[in-house]
Image (cartoon, rainbow, N blue to C red):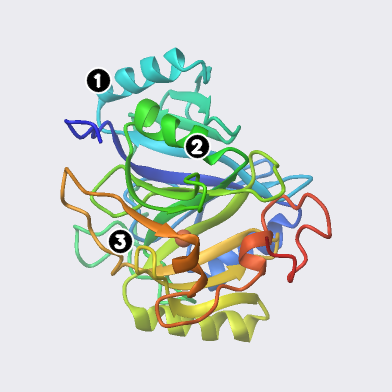
Amino acid sequence: MSPQRCRDIAHVSAVELRTQVPAETVDFFVRLMGLSEVARDGSRTYLRTWDDYERFTVCVVGAADSGIGRTWLRAAGPEALDRRVRAIEDAGLGLGWADGEEGIGPTYRFTDTDGHEFGIYWESDWYEAPEGQRPALKNQAAPFPGRGASVRRLDHVNYLAADVPAVTAFLPGVLGAELTEQIVMDDGVPSAVWYHVGDKSYDLVYTSDWTGSTGRLHHVAFAADQREDILRAADVMLEAGIHIETGPHKHAIQQTFFLYVYEPGGNRIELCNAGARLVLAPDWRPISWSRAERARGQAWGLKTIDSFHTHGTPPVDAAADAPGTAR
Ligand SMILES: [Fe+2]
């Protein structure tokens, strides 16, 4: 725990999702999750959750395979951006500056220690709802859509990583993130770690990739307001023929109320309630969960489904993603 909490990253702002079926993936996000399309650029479709103050929340990209592309982080200010870029370059993880896109300014590209791509930036053109689509209250980015799950915002990203211990040096040392909870195996090695950059108890999560692959995605999570919204979302997904992997239920770790589905491109999407806790303590004492404690299942006893340990995107081979092959 560093003596002075770093606040250089304001929040995780957007993700790029790869899919072999971009039209179906866009339809999933618009019709079932309640996002809106803001722009298209070739194979890239920019979508936003209704309460995002920025231009876009998800960029759906038609690609040869599924998985996560870039994750965008908004710096807390221009000096914070400079500090983080220096730290990234010192760590040898920088890829250089790129022009911004769809409402965001110059973006410094880099990778984490596992090869996932990130972009950090400061300049951002806030979203302005078009005439005729303005919300009744001016302190809200857009009207509540009342469509599908109507998720409010991006909540967190859970990456798969071949080397979780390497990530535990990168996240605090390079990004200034703080550990809030972790799973530690009997040999003392962490297999999953939850870090936060703001007051929300987690923003960036890394889970050991049992296949040993790098750069894969476990899931991207979106927040709705209440537990009831997650129950309704399960009905929405059921009706639409979307694969529900597990839930609704309550996590033991971080206590989030959850639903996991696979969007049509195969990427795992979590819907979670915004009742996820805030960690306000700047000297928070990280919670460690043992393998035995994990084996008890989720908060109310639901056992963790095998595919939760095996499915990631892109798939590495058919056997690896087959339910029932849990480690
Ligand atoms: Fe999650």
Q: Nearer the viewer, residue 161 or 100?
A: 161
Decide if residue 50 is on the left or right side of residue 30: left
SS at mark 3? loop
| Residue 295 sits above or below residue 228 on the image | above
In percent of the image, x 37 and y 15: which residue is there? 86
* Residue beneath disc 1: 79
Amino acid type at image mark 2:
Pro
Q: CA distance from mark 3 to mark 1?
A: 33 Å
From what the image shows, is residue 53 above or below residue 100?
Answer: below
Label 3: which residue? Answer: 134
* Foreground pick, 98 / 146: 98
Residue 176 x/y as whole percent: 32, 32
Tell me whether the residue at label 3 lies in contact with that at label 1, contact meaning CB atoms closer than 8 angstroms: no
Task: Confirm if mark 3 falls within 8 A of ligand 1.
Answer: no
How far across and down, in percent of the image, does residue 300 sit? Answer: 41, 82
Q: CA distance from mark 1 to mark 2?
A: 29 Å
**Foreground: disc 3 or disc 2:** 2
- Assign a secondary structure to mark 1: helix
* Label number found at residue 165: 2
Q: Amino acid at mark 1?
A: Glu
Q: Is residue 294 above or below residue 123?
A: below
Query: Quarter of the image containing the N terminus?
Result: top left
Query: Does 7 sit left or right of 232 as displayed?
Result: left
Where on the picture, by quarter, is residue 72? top left
Q: Position of residue 295 (x, y in %)?
A: 52, 70
Please tell me which residue lies in front, 245 or 303: 303
Above or below: residue 24 compared with residue 7: below
Q: Earlier in the sequence, mark 3 or mark 1?
A: 1
Q: Residue 20 location, x and y as percent? A: 76, 53
The amino acid beneath tag 3 is: Arg
Residue at x 43%, y 23% (from the top left corner): 106
